[in-house]
């Protein structure tokens, strides 16, 4: 069976990588000068995997609309917590062994949760930025929390670091990787090998967290 490539991206890499996107489309990343025949042979060898993965991707159901009901699950720092509606509590939303939300706030659950995540994001990310900055002599100008969906962080030319609140749904080591990534941009603006050297010198394990984000990033949402 001939497998068609939707996108072939050549770059300064040493190996061929096959990527099945969420919509089932097929991207191949290949070294600059790899002969097309070598790429095709590689794809043929992986044909089973490609077919299987495509099928799996297509069968993933679109996410169900949140209702903010009892028993719904919400992520925080990489763990999943059940939601419980309560008649009265001091804050609209509270977390200890699970999330509890005041029943009267259920209709605006998304807003309440978003505000809660934003507050936690600012606390936690600020603290991590402070710690890494002190240890590795970075001077970020300011930290801002955004609502970006897939852009986990960015570093603006004036030295302001932006992070999406969705990051606090991820495990702390993933947050740390994104923090280090953006701090490293204060030294190297682009994603050259010099940049990754800076990241690696501070966070040697970063490839693991980067992979986690690639694979699980879509779960970091309400
Ligand atoms: Zn970057």
Image (cartoon, grey):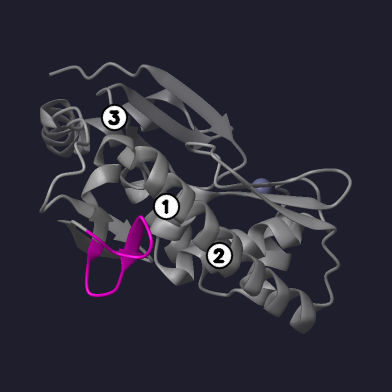
Q: Secondary structure at mark 2?
A: helix
SS for dot 3: loop
Magenta-colored span: 88-99
Where residue 173 appears, as percent x and y from the top left, is: 47, 71
Main secondary structure type of the part rendered in magenta: loop
User: Circle 1 is placed at which residue position?
Assistant: 213
The residue labelled by disc 2 is: 177
- Looking at the image, is 117 positioned above or below residue 7? below
Residue 84 counted in the magenta span: no
Question: From what the image shows, is residue 183 above or below residue 217?
Answer: below
Q: Is residue 155 left or right of residue 146?
A: right
Up/down of 119 relative to 155, above or below: below
Mark 1 or 3 closer to N-term?
3
- Residue drawn at x 34%, y 58% is 93
Q: Earlier in the sequence, mark 2 or mark 1?
A: 2
The residue labelled by disc 3 is 22
């Amino acid at each position: 069976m001939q497998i068609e490539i939707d996108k072939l991206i050549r770059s300064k890499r040493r190996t061929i990588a096959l990527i099945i996107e969420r919509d089932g489309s097929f991207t191949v990343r290949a070294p600059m000068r790899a002969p097309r025949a070598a790429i095709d042979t590689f794809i043929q060898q992986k044909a089973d995997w490609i077919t299987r993965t495509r099928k799996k991707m297509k069968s993933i159901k679109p996410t169900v609309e949140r209702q903010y009901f009892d028993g719904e699950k919400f992520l925080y720092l990489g763990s999943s917590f059940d939601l419980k509606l309560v008649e009265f509590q001091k804050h609209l939303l509270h977390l200890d062994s699970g999330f509890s939300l005041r029943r009267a706030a259920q209709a605006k659950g998304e807003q309440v949760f978003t505000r809660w995540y934003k507050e936690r994001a600012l606390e936690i990310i600020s603290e991590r930025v402070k710690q890494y900055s002190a240890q590795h002599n970075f001077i970020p100008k300011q930290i801002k929390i955004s609502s970006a969906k897939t852009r986990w962080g960015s570093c603006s030319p004036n030295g302001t670091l932006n992070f999406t609140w969705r990051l606090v749904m991820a495990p702390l080591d993933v947050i740390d990787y994104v923090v280090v990534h953006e701090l490293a941009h204060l030294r190297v603006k682009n994603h050259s090998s010099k940049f990754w050297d800076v990241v690696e010198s501070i966070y040697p394990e970063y490839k693991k967290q980067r992979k986690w984000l690639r694979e699980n990033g879509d779960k970091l949402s309400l």
